[in-house]
Amino acid sequence: MAAEEEGDVEWVVDTIAGFLQGPAWSIPILEFMEQKCEVFDDEEESKLSYTEIYKEYQALVEKLLEDYLKEVGINEEKFQEAFSSPLAKTRTSQAILQTVLAAEDFRLFKKMMVQKNIEMQLQAIRIIKERNGVLPDCLTEGSDVFSEIEEEEMKILREVLRKSKEEYEIEQERKRTEEARGKLKSPDVSYGSPGDSREAIKVKESMEGADDSEGTPKLPLEESQKYAREDLKPVRPLPKGTESLPQPSCTKGKDDVKKRSAGKCSENAAQKAGMKGPNLSELEKQQLKQREDYLKKKRDMLMATKKESRNNVLLPSNSEQKEEESSPKEEMSEEKQRLLQKRKMLAEKLKEEVINKR
Amino acid sequence: MGDVQKHPSTPQGSPSTPHPQGLLSVIQKLKGSPEQELRIVLLGLDNAGKTTLLKRLASEEVSTITPTQGFNIKSVHSHGFKLNVWDIGGQRSIRPYWRKYLGSTDLLIYVIDSADQKRFEETGQELAELTEDESLMGVPLLVFANKQDLVTAAPAAEIAEGLSLHTYRDREWQIQACSALSGEGVQDGMNWISSQIMNRKK
């Protein structure tokens, strides 16, 4: 009899734990969070509007649970019994239960929503960067305004490098405390600031190595590839027909001129961009590598968190939602992008705080 | 709250404690903290010192406090209980929201700026309305006569009289003079809260 009851309890607990890891639970919960997280910030004081959202969340959790219990024929009594038993604690993890517990713990709920908001912001920023990381064509086409364009681009590059450096220095400090985290590797590296400075090297190297420039950008960073191409274009001193430049079959004289001026330009570029002369020391390269790895790590942490909350469920609606999220922001002006940069830094700061607190 | 009812007196010491619906209350037990949690709501007019008091209770810095637009929550551990204290902004525009925070409340703390004589009547009205709310039926009430550090502060006894506290017969109540800024008297108030909890849980 006792054994039978125990088996019953076990079955109830396992069934519900399974439900909490499945799409019927996680999809509506995730959708709710994504839709409502926008107003949640990391301030200590809570807004009155949180309370309404919290009540909606409680209602959602209750309804999802109730409907499921009805569906599988577990009555409330059995549920109570099962989840009052010690088994409930050993068979379920806090991670699985988090979304349920948040319905009874406002502060846990707030933490979850703040974190989700930051994740969404970072995602939106990444998408915008991927799409708008390039200058409009009007600025890169036509060699007659070459020097102007070059200067403009150098300005931008310099700015990017400066910001990237600042960010790096800030992040480097935090890194130490974060060392133990996130060991996963993913090819999906997102934020390109380090790539930008790497690009300066790439440009230089490829220029020195003359004509294989078009073949070099093998970086996974889409946007840095774009930067590379932008850098290359104005650097070519010859008007018209320069499309075929990278081929070594060009006429000799021209080729030489091209090489020389190209080399010069890129050297210039590197210097202007705040690099220390034409040659990067091993140490600097190592630092750049570190930065790249660090950003990779951060990205992975984000992905891991998402995965966890998604519980291995494929969500076709999900990516669509992301697109929607970002689409209104697509046509952003340069100025807004700068604003965005600020926001990004802030968001990352918040993100670290929130995630580290967990 | 259209028609206000006078509730018949409930026996003292056994306040009603509404609880969240079935499923969620079960979930609550899975949180894994062995301490029993109690919900305390901290109310009062704007500038009464609610947030300062909250921070004082949580042993936090009280020097940089700005008017609360929303609400704050902090946990205070006392006698094996975890007291979750909700401090909700007291500005007139926010007061209509107070009601939303009253459910499942185990104890009400009401804070008064003892030096703000001009608003004694206003604060008395707010308190009277609160105590008529169904969610707070029989819930013990602690009134902090705050800002006793100011020379113009009225003594607690005078405030009690002004509030007609003696007419509150459907609940346990206490008035405590204090200064949230200096901390004086705050612990005495907490001791009363503890005694209420202990009584109730026996």
Image (cartoon, coloured by chain):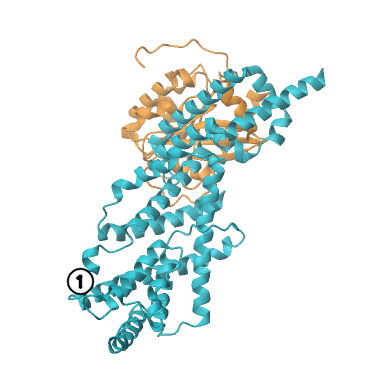
Chain colours: A cyan, B orange
Chain letter, disc 1 residue? A
**Quarter of image, res B191:** top right
Q: Position of residue B62 (x, y in %)?
A: 46, 49
Closest to the observer: B195 or B157? B195
Amino acid at the residue labelled 1: Gly
Residue A107: x %, y % from top left: 51, 39
Residue visible at 38% across and 68% down in the picture? A163
Quadrant occupied by the C terminus of chain B: top right
Quadrant in the picture for residue B28: top right
Residue A32 in picture, x, y percent from top left: 44, 34
Image-based side of B17 in relation to A2, left or right? left
Which residue is nearer to you in this view: A331 or A247? A247
Quadrant assignment, res B10? top right
Residue closer to the observer: A210 or B100: A210
* Rendered view: A230 above or below A132: below
The answer to whether A304 appears left or right of A223 in the picture is: right
- Residue at figure coordinates x 53%, y 28% from the top left: B107
Q: Which residue is mark 1?
A: A142
